[in-house]
Image: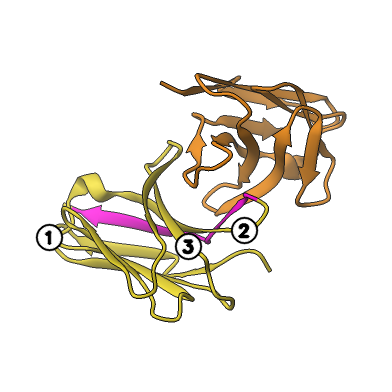
Chain colours: A orange, B yellow
Amino acid sequence: SQTIHQWPATLVQPVGSPLSLECTVEGTSNPNLYWYRQAAGRGLQLLFYSVGIGQISSEVPQNLSASRPQDRQFILSSKKLLLSDSGFYLCAWRQVRGNTIYFGEGSWLTVV
Amino acid sequence: GQQVMQIPQYQHVQEGEDFTTYCNSSTTLSNIQWYKQRPGGHPVFLIQLVKSGEVKKQKRLTFQFGEAKKNSSLHITATQTTDVGTYFCAKGTGANNLFFGTGTRLTVIP
């Protein structure tokens, strides 16, 4: 069966510090991968998606970036965090010909 | 934009009362999905609707897709405390992406 792992689960980072959130999927190959952000009490905002290794599409301009160095690995990064980057970050995957998106457990980021 | 609008944003109901959330799009949707996010958790897939006028049921949950495929609803009969959470609709796009609605946060008062 397929599983998705995301870490760290929580982190508190100072403004201006870098960020790296990592996500891996097991039990499937060539999945579509996604990063969503959810501000406190808000909806889900699609940040990045990837249909293959090295292929990243950004949905919103921001100081975040994403990379996909391996087929089932998706990384969300920032060189300098802003206060507004605080939120709940969710990695997700979907089979290429599937419709359902499966989410990881999420990472709570607080920028102080 | 890519989002779909959901109403209401918040809903408080007494346990045993019914609950409905509505999802509206300005464009015709190829399909609509519904997800539930428990407090502190991640969204979990509930169902997908594809056909115009489609109605699907999952126990006390009834999902409906509008005839024009521009709106959808989720109705919960006789809510229970386990129904607490935020319910999202989501629309697919040709780029294999999923854009989520603004969500409806349901609180059930025991």
Quick one: quadrant of the N terminus of chain A? top left
At label 2, which amino acid type do we have?
A: Thr
Residue bearing the label numbered 3:
B31
Circle 1: element type = loop
**N-terminal-most mark, 1 or 2:** 1
Q: Quadrant of residue B8?
A: bottom left
- Contact between marks 2 and 3 (CB within 8 A): the answer is no
* Residue drawn at 83 percent across, 46 percent down: A62
At label 1, which amino acid type do we have?
A: Gly
In the rendered structure, find residue B93 and report the number of the disc placed on it: 2
Q: Main secondary structure of the magenta part?
A: strand
Residue bearing the label numbered 1:
B16
Q: CA distance from mark 1 to mark 2?
A: 36 Å
Chain containing mark 1: B
* Residue drawn at 43 percent across, 37 percent down: B40
Eye-nearest disc, 1 or 3: 3
Foreground of the two, B18 or B28: B28
Q: Quadrant of residue A53?
A: top right
Chain containing mark 3: B
Foreground of the two, B31 or B7: B31
**N-terminal-most mark, 1 or 3:** 1
Magenta range is B96-109
Residue A97 horizontal side relative to residue B107, left or right: right
